[in-house]
Image (cartoon, rainbow, N blue to C red):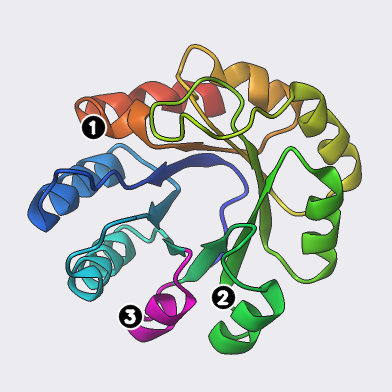
Amino acid sequence: MILPKTGLYAITQTVNKTPNQVISEVSAALKAGISLLQYRDKQPVDAVYLAGALKELCHSHNTPLIINDDIKLAKLIGADGVHIGQEDGQLSYAREILGKNALIGVSCYDNLDRALEAEQNSADYVAFGRFFPSHSKPLAAPAHISTLQKAKNSIKVPIIAIGGILPTNGAELLTAGADILAVIGGIFDQTPYQSALAYQALFK
């Protein structure tokens, strides 16, 4: 699938939830018009089943599914791509395993040089954050709005912002240079359909 140029990037929230709950919540978010979904699960019980089910669900909405961290899982279920962090494996390895058409994103935290290197090495998008206090990633180091502004002037691939993003503060990040907003708790802490829908006005 083609990577969207803008929109809401939902990231699954799996803690204390059954696979069926996660699937139901994602289904609601898809109906609200999310542009991307990332399957993130730090304590997976049956990752192959859940990731496979989410892929089928996403594809029924023509929405790409990205797997967090796990290159082998992405390959196994035929996901659209993978998101890798600082210690999740090399970008070149992910490209070799998943192929030239895979969507590969890289966490760049607050590091513009890392983003430039990722773009040079075939990353499809770069992600910066966290920008605001986050319950999902409370210990993540903060990123600065100025990093987005600099990235917008030097990076051609889509720029993703993450970390404590709400409908009330997302516009600031889009104005600074983000193309896509990645959200976990802002969608899945509440009613996913209504929560995801509340972000859509930011992209109009």
204 relative to 82, above or below? above
Q: At 49% across and 11% down in the image, what residue appears?
A: 168
Q: Where does the image place residue 143, in percent across and percent down from the top left?
A: 69, 29
Between the C-alphas of marks 1 and 2, the distance is: 28 Å
Badge 1 is on which residue?
A: 193
Q: Is residue 160 left or right of residue 19?
A: right
Q: Where does the image place residue 112, in percent across and percent down from the top left?
A: 83, 44
Q: Earlier in the sequence, mark 2 or mark 3?
A: 3
Badge 3 is on which residue?
A: 77
100 relative to 167, above or below? below
Between the C-alphas of marks 3 and 1, the distance is: 26 Å
| Amino acid type, mark 2 | Ala
Q: Earlier in the sequence, mark 3 or mark 1?
A: 3
Q: Quadrant of residue 97?
A: bottom right
Q: Is residue 91 left or right of residue 112?
A: left
Q: Secondary structure at mark 3?
A: helix
178 relative to 62, above or below? above
Image quadrant occupied by the C terminus? top right
Towards the viewer: 1 or 74: 74
| Amino acid type, mark 3 | Ile
| Amino acid type, mark 1 | Tyr
Q: Where does the image place residue 134, in percent across and percent down from the top left?
A: 46, 25
73 relative to 30, above or below? below
Q: Nearer the viewer, mark 3 or mark 1?
A: 3
Q: Is residue 51 left or right of residue 40?
A: left
Q: At 18% across and 70% down in the image, what residue appears?
A: 46
Query: Seen from this angle, which residue lies furthest front?
Result: 139
Badge 2 is on which residue?
A: 102
What is the magenta range?
A: 69-79
